[in-house]
Amino acid sequence: MKISKPVLTLWLMAPIALVLGLSVWIVVSMQGKPWMHAPPVGAGAGQTGGANALGEWLAHRNESVRVRIVVEDRGEGRDGDSGPLIAHRANGWKGESMAEAGSNRWVWTGASADLDEGFEVIRTGTDGVIWRDAGGRRMLRLTAGEQVVVVQRFVR
């Protein structure tokens, strides 16, 4: 079987053309905006936050790590002396009391695994009505450390 010179030349140039095509594609794709839309997480989050969020998602978070949620209650119409409660999957979304940490600041410390489906900040009025944070369910943005949550208002 005899292979003609042009076919053999094209066959030998194919890997070079493939590498050149991939290089052009990489350069062109770097000119656009990033495709990852994850919030910045962890050290160096300004530039590498998407990569950190992906790594944490792949690692499924270390379940033994403790996190601290700080709630700044700026909500109006406080009813009663009780502070806000934090509701999450581990407590059946019922609400768990938080420790007072100054003027209108409340703190909860617990396992990051308890907040794998997020958490809500709620308040129970003296009449038993549950008021929820207007911001809705919030997600844990870190694996360890402190996350500050500002509550502007509560709704029924």
Image (cartoon, rainbow, N blue to C red):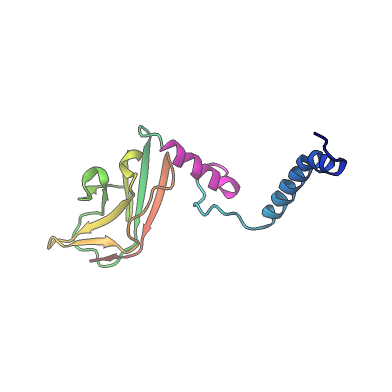
Q: Quadrant of the N terminus?
A: top right
In the rendered image, the vertical position of residue 124 relative to residue 65, given as above or below: below
Residue at the limit of the structure toward the right, as seen here = 5
Residue span colored magenta: 42-60
In the rendered image, the vertical position of residue 115 relative to residue 84, given as above or below: above
Residue 100 position in % (x across, y down): 29, 48
Dominant secondary structure, magenta: helix
In the rendered image, the vertical position of residue 44 relative to residue 128, given as above or below: above
Q: Quadrant of the C terminus?
A: bottom left
Residue at the limit of the structure toward the front, as seen here = 1
Residue 148 position in % (x across, y down): 40, 51
Residue 115 occupies quadrant: top left
Whether residue 110 sits left or right of residue 4 in the image: it is left
Residue 90 position in % (x across, y down): 25, 42
Residue at the limit of the structure toward the top, as seen here = 64
In the rendered image, the vertical position of residue 72 relative to residue 4, given as above or below: below
Residue 15 position in % (x across, y down): 76, 40
Residue 35 occupies quadrant: bottom right
**The one of 103 and 107 positioned closer to us in this rendering:** 107
Is residue 42 in view?
A: no
- Per the image, is 43 magenta? yes
Residue at 25 percent of width and 56 percent of height: 122
**The one of 33 and 104 positioned closer to us in this rendering:** 33
Whether residue 109 sits left or right of residue 18 in the image: it is left
Residue at 23 percent of width and 58 percent of height: 123
Is residue 124 in view?
A: yes
